[in-house]
Amino acid sequence: MDAKKITPLVAQYKAIKEQYPDVILMFRLGDFYEMFGDDAVTASRELEIVLTSRSQGYAADVPMCGVPYHAVDKYVAKLISRGYRVAICDQLEDPKKAKKIVKRGVTRVVTPGTVLEDGMLDAKSNNYLVAVTSEPELYGLAVVDISTGEFAVTEISQKNGSRELLDEISRLAPAEVLLRELDWDLEAPIRANTTAVVTKYECDSFYRKPAKDFLLEHFHTESLRGFGAEQMTAALEAAAMVIDYLRQTNQNALASISSMSTYSTSGFMILDSAARRHLELTQSLSGTTKGASLLSVIDQTKTAMGARLLRKWLDQPLLDVEAINRRLDAVEELYTNVLSRKDVRDQLGGVQDLERLMSRIVAETATPRDLVAFAQSLKKVPSIARSLEGSRSERLHTLREALDYLESIVELIERAIVNDPPAAVRDGGIIAQGYNSELDELRRASIDGKSWVAALETRERERTGIKNLKVSYNTVFGYYIEVTKPNLHLVPDEYIRKQTTTNAERFITPALKEIEAKILHADELAAELEYQLFCEVRSKVAEEARKVGKIARALAEIDVLSSLAEVAALRGYCRPVVNESEEIRIKNGRHPVVEAYLQERFVPNDTYVNCDSDQLLIITGPNMAGKSTYLRQVALITLLAQIGSFVPADEATIGVVDRIFTRVGAHDELASGQSTFMVEMNETANILNNATRRSLIVLDEIGRGTSTYDGLSIAWAVAEEINKISARTLFATHYHHLNELEKELRGVKNYRVTVREEKDRIVWLRKIVPGGTDKSYGIEVARLAGIPQSTIERAREILKELESDRTSRGLVDGRTKIKVREETLQLTLFSLDKHPVIEELENLDITTMSPIEALNKLYELQKKLSKDGLPGR
Amino acid sequence: MQSKSETSDASRIIILDEHTANRIAAGEVVERPVSVVKELVENSLDAGATQITVSIEQGGKELIKVTDNGCGMTREDAILSLQRHATSKIRSASDLKAIRTLGFRGEALPSIASISILEMITKHESQPAGTRLEVEAGSITNLESVGAPQGTTIIVRKLFFNTPARLKFLKSAQTEFSHIAEYVGWFALAWPTVSFRLLHGGREVLSSPATGQRLNSIVEVLGKDIAKQLVEVHYELPGVRVEGFVSCPSLTRINRRDQIFFVNGRPIRNKIIAHALDYAYRGLLPSGRYPVAVLFLEVPPELVDVNVHPAKSEVKFSNEQEVHSAVYRSVNMALTTGAAIPTISEHAEPLGKPAPISSEQADITSKLFVPWPDAATQQHIQPMNLSAFQEALRRRREQALSEISDVGEDSWQKGSGVPVEESPVPEADFIAPRTVALTGVRVIGQARNMYVLAECDDGLLVIDQHVAHERILYDQLLRFDAESRSAIQRLLTPITISLSASESTVVRQRLDMLNQAGFDLEEFGRDTFILRGAPPQLKPSQAEAILRDIIAELVELSVERHLIVRSDQVLITTACKMAIKAGEKLDDREMKQLVEDLLKCENPFVCPHGRPIIVSLSNWELDRKFKRT
Ligand SMILES: Nc1ncnc2c1ncn2[C@@H]1O[C@H](COP(=O)(O)OP(=O)(O)OP(=O)(O)O)[C@@H](O)[C@H]1O
Ligand SMILES: [Mg+2]
């Protein structure tokens, strides 16, 4: 490109763009953010905005597109949601004051994990940025949500390869994951397990000291002991990556990261990503985020903070029986005490997202409205505390204690900021009368000026004798004097004509303009001062971040507990007994989600399973009978109990479970290049390798994706193996042969889901009863599903044949031939196949038969023949 | 509540003999959708249900669905239950004497089935499969097995589809539903051990989980603000036991709608109980105010005659005397000793001024004897944001008030022994043009600097001066025309008014209406306006203050509603702010002018906010009170 033709502006753009090669650069030009070149092509496609081209001093036309500055958030959000990163390049000085070209620079890089704007965030879930590092035998993981200030690190063992790491990442469901170049091999598996954008972390060695020093500097502390993270080198490295990345992208956000906590994945029930997905905890399998998930059924929270915490609880059921019971006590108290529950929930309804408000306050992006909302929310705190007065449960008591009332902050905001302020920070109208005398004076000056102008009307009327002379205002000329046409001859000389309308002419005078300038100046100064005062108030408030954080966490938990109580009352749940036993005993259990969405009434079922006498429940029954529903219902009830929720049952005793394994339905993961059967076997292997006696295993059909014999054999062997592990297991299957295990293995119990055949129809009774089954009614289900009648009839015929085959030959197997349709009618009697009698004869082992036996056999065969009628006889 | 085993025993259904059937005054069981709900829910309760869900579409005209988890029915029982006079509850006429169960005629289901399209799904414990039955106009059209949990679901569609006369008689869906809501609310109050859920159009309107505590049901049905101000009553005399809750004297109502009585679990009306209640509050309440009460009486069935009306709402006691004294004493005791203040009212504050609380005793006394709030404060006691359920109840009440001919309030007074001076339902006294004609009106004077007293040919009139003036001004503002424009008074010096950002936004949006209201207002620089003229009704010196008042109120309205203030709101607010205040002394000329202007208004009875302007006492009433007729 010809360098001479490049204007200074283009040079500036190119210099900046060079530093941000793989992000979309939005370049502020006047009232627009413009994008050029490839950025413009991408943006116009993703944002559906027009692509133009203008020779901006380039030799060739360069594609460009732009978005208006006031709507930029919306467009950025859209690009972020599509997985792009965006650098915002702003004007760093007032264009009016700039001598030459306006100074510009990137003020922030927006990435999925670093957004702070309300419009780009989902109120009900955290927006996590995760960094991962690896060391020999260990992974370090740091997770931050800059919108709430939450920052935590952990270390994860590599004894199962990357599986545990991936489980943890999928639990967190981050928006963005940071990886170092040398850990880039994790990129593909992370992409396969989450929807996160994976970003390569580039260390800027100029700024970046070794992790520990870097963190000490950030937190302004002497040691990391206070965070309990001193020895966790892998975790610290990840933490440093996060902080450094934020510094590179969103400097402001760093301020809200004021502390760091460590956590261990071992205090919680392990739910791998498969289990999370299969049990539809936060997302239904059909894909849509909300859909019919467990979360959607039990989320009655009133605040966004509560909603996020509930989601966290659901993702991390507890193992500690005491901790669980503490939650249950609190839920029970709120469940029984209807009045205080209603009171608390009414009050919580008026509480805004304190965590995110606080983050914006700290990051200096909070608006005056944010501050007012913040104060109004804090004001609810005392009455919430009052509603919880006298609570007996330990947890509620502790939470109530945490509800400090930050009166001085509320008072400050209420004194400083008007009731209903504008959203913009620089246009004034924010600060209340009486808060600052200087401001009041400026305002008075402006008002006095205006009164002078108003009085001018009377004065000028008298002076000029123009009766209907009028002083008015419009945004184009400011103040002017209007005189109607008939009076024009009375206009004094010093009036300066500005505009002529149909009936009148408009004038100004130097004196009027002088006062107007004063008014404008006072207004300008006032607005500036207001901004300054507002910022002061905001930083004052920011100092309380830690206290507010504590209150916010307490409110969130109160919200979750009262929501669980509300759900329990609404849906008729009962308090489970949670203990260290090895039983799960459920009376009249229901599936919380199916129950909520079902048109008819849900049929409740009992469950009893333990680690020895009733360890492996084999559940058979026709298609559509409710096997899968039943299996998940048991898993969900267990899980709910362990988060401290009441459960959909009449009674339940849950001996805590360290892990729930699921192997559910066949489903392809083409994205990860695995076939149905491969996925299934992977999951099964995982179960066999990792299940303990304390685990709960839910197997919904194994071996479906392969041939019947292979499938059955695998299912059988898996069942035997699980029996050895002694983990409580529910195993739904269509292989009725597995019923035989009951006789062979201790702890195996057969159950079936009952149906009734009525005329040409089956009735699903949905009741689980002891015992096995031998029929699948698959064809009936196919008929219900709308398979054409002719196909159904044909299927019935084939089934009949196969079944009659089975009687003589045992299992249905691959050798059985299905006869061609047209011939069916004639050929049933004159089978082209070998006659069963002949076959049986062939298979006779005469050497082991006694003469009597041989004689009997002969007699039997002869009888069979005479019954069937062999051709030619 | 009965245990399931008891009821499942009783659930063997037997066809009543002719004699018994005829003894029961059949009447018309099903009058409107609420009758269906009532019958079905009673059946559910009799079946020992602990969870009952009532789903309604279109006020019950489209669909009524009652689902319970009671004992359910076997297939034969289900079929039998649809035949007339089949009941599991009474076997012979002698059983009628001791009716304890709620439904007893055994004719509800067949009656309902004969006038609707009915579907029943029921399953009895003893059978593996449930039964689904479809009935159209009384004949079974489908019968099959289904999988179902124990219990019964009955779906009534297209009620009255074959009786057009009845159908025509039905009110709007909202009205029909409000009857249902009220009734289901009563059930919830009476059965705290049963979960009730009520849905209308899929929306949950009431949910009263089974907690076993009456007060919790009251929280759900009447709202927590009322529940916080109740005291518990409890008393027993031979032959009658009284339990329940009544309000502290600080919580009152203008009518008896929140007095709900149950006898043996059945919601009823009864003048004896009402009177005993009044008697206990004698001297504690201002006239025309009534306590809230939810009372449960247990009386031996043989002493209660419930068969007086098919709706079972009115009962007669054989032991009236005992009932009266039990109610009186229970309430009196609770009010005077305050012994039974419910624990959860700990943080209840009387809605009036919070009284200082030193000890528990002081707490109780303060609750019981805070001065009753005046009418203005009472307005606030009505919960401002009503739940859907309360909203339904409110409608119900309003509707009841409009049906004045209903079981007359007279019956409360008759037989009470004590003359009841105050008319129980003041709203019913809003003067209706047909009762007192406003002719020959003459001002008599002013009372409490609030009301203008006047007489007319037909009786006495009390006119609220503020709302009367408000009406007059509003009508004038509405008729704004060129003539009015010329009437605007020019201010000598225009006034600049600087406003906050939100105020100026509202003013800018509604400048047109403010101009129409007579304020010559124009934008004058940032967030500043210039006022050059004011409505003729105002003294120029007041103009700015009143305009600011109006603007403040408009901001309030727009914030509250999150939308642009409606134009008539601007006018109403303006009229209200400009009007004479209560407490202003008026001279004769002013009063005369006021009344004269008022009589010119198209609707001199109700102010634009909907409050009454004139209350009347007709000559006839007056004479009757003095026993001159
Ligand atoms: N206990 C129940 N009460 C009422 N309805 C139920 C119950 N259990 C299941 N259902 C209904 O039956 C449907 C089918 O259930 P489910 O998928 O569990 O059957 P399944 O036995 O696993 O069938 P398949 O063998 O085809 O996998 C559910 O979607 C639900 O609507
Ligand atoms: Mg299944």
Image: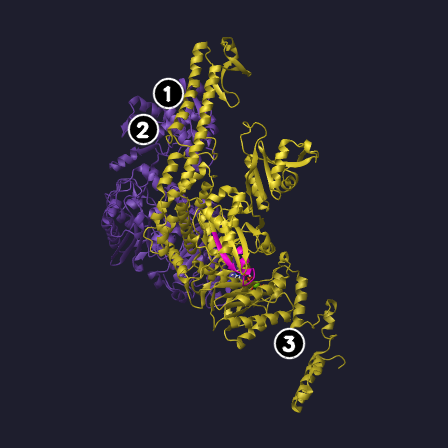
Chain colours: A yellow, B purple
Assign ligand 1 to one image quadrant.
bottom right
Which of the 4 image quarters holds residue A671?
bottom right
Q: Which residue is mark 3?
A: A810
Question: Cβ of disc 1 within 8 Å of ligand 1?
Answer: no
Q: Position of residue B86 (x, y in %)?
A: 43, 62
Q: Are marks 3 and 2 in contact (CB under 8 Å)?
A: no
Bounds of the magenta segment: A152-170
Mark 2: which amino acid? Asp
Q: What chain does badge 2 belong to?
A: B
Q: Position of residue A373 (x, y in %)?
A: 43, 40
Q: Going by the image, does A132 lie left or right of A556?
A: right
Decide whether residue A49 is among the magenta residues.
no
Mark 1: which amino acid? Pro
Q: CA distance from mark 2 to mark 1?
A: 39 Å
Q: Going by the image, does A431 lie left or right of A712?
A: left
Q: What chain does badge 3 belong to?
A: A
Decide whether residue A161 is among the magenta residues.
yes
The answer to whether tags 3 and 1 share a subunit is no
Residues A32 and A858: in front is A32
Q: Which residue is mark 1?
A: B540
The answer to whether tags 2 and 1 share a subunit is yes
Tell me if residue A303 comes above or below residue A856 in the rendering.
Answer: above
Q: Can you name the residue that lies furthest to the bottom here? A: A851
Q: CA distance from mark 3 to mark 2?
A: 106 Å
Q: Secondary structure at mark 1?
A: helix
Q: Are marks 3 and 1 in contact (CB under 8 Å)?
A: no
Q: Which residue is mark 2?
A: B457
